[in-house]
Image (tube, grey):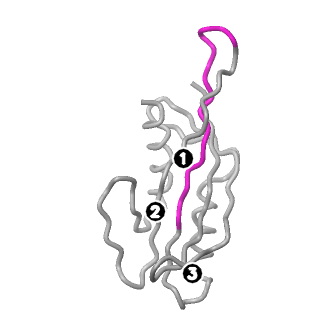
Amino acid sequence: MTLTKIGAALSTQLATLALPTAWENSRFKPTAGQVYLAESLIAGNTLAVGVAIQASDEFGGIYQVLVYSPTDAGKGIGRATADTVAAAFVRGDRLVYDGVTVTILSTSQAGGFISGDRWVVPVSIKYRALL
């Protein structure tokens, strides 16, 4: 249940960008020549914040957003879109969904790579939530 709410908080924020997105476990057919995103939630370890039974748990992980842009179009559109995604998840932001607050710890971009007819730029958003 907790990961569902964490994922929903992050997905809701990504949806504000109004870009075509392949949501986890949903059918998606990309349009040729168009940029699109693909999301996945990579949950990390759950850590106890204290030793008491009532102590909070810290849920952490990475929200991975892959930016797919057409190959042979230069890196500009892919990197610009990755910058847009990163700007939507600023360090310190608190995203709330159904009583769960997710805090953004950091956002980074990795080197791009070719996959089929697309150039892909990974954007990694590190998060945590205390419950």
The secondary structure type at the circle numbered 3 is helix
Q: What quarter of the picture does the C terminus occupy?
A: top right
Query: Please, what is the dominant secondary structure of the magenta stretch?
Result: strand
Amino acid under disc 1: Ile
Give me the residue at 37% from left, 83% from top.
32
The image shows residue 17, relative to residue 106, as above or below, that is below
The alpha-carbon separation of the residues under discs 1 and 2 comes to 13 Å
Q: Residue at x 60, y 88 (%)?
A: 74
Which residue type carries mark 2? Ala
Upstream in the sequence, badge 2 or badge 3?
A: 2
Q: Label 1 belongs to which residue?
A: 42
Coordinates of residue 62 in the picture (x, y in percent): 59, 48
Number of numbered labels in the structure image: 3
Query: Any mark on residue 77, and which?
Result: 3
Question: Which mark is in front, 1 or 2?
Answer: 1
Answer few, some or many: residues within 10 Å of disc 3's Cα (few below 14, many 20 plus, some between 14 and 19): some
Range shown magenta: 51-66
Three-letter residue code for mark 3? Ile
Q: Are marks 3 and 1 in contact (CB under 8 Å)?
A: no
Query: Which of disc 1 and disc 3 is earlier in sequence?
Result: 1
Asked if residue 52 lies in the magenta stretch, the reply is: yes
User: In the image, is 34 to the left or to the right of 43?
Assistant: left
Q: Residue at x 48, y 83 (%)?
A: 70
Front of the two marks 3 and 1? 1
Q: Is residue 15 above or below residue 33?
A: above
Image quarter of the N terminus? top left
The nearer-to-camera label among 2 and 3 is: 2
* Residue assigned mark 2: 38
Distance from Cα at disc 3 to Cα at disc 1: 26 Å
108, 17: nearer the viewer: 108
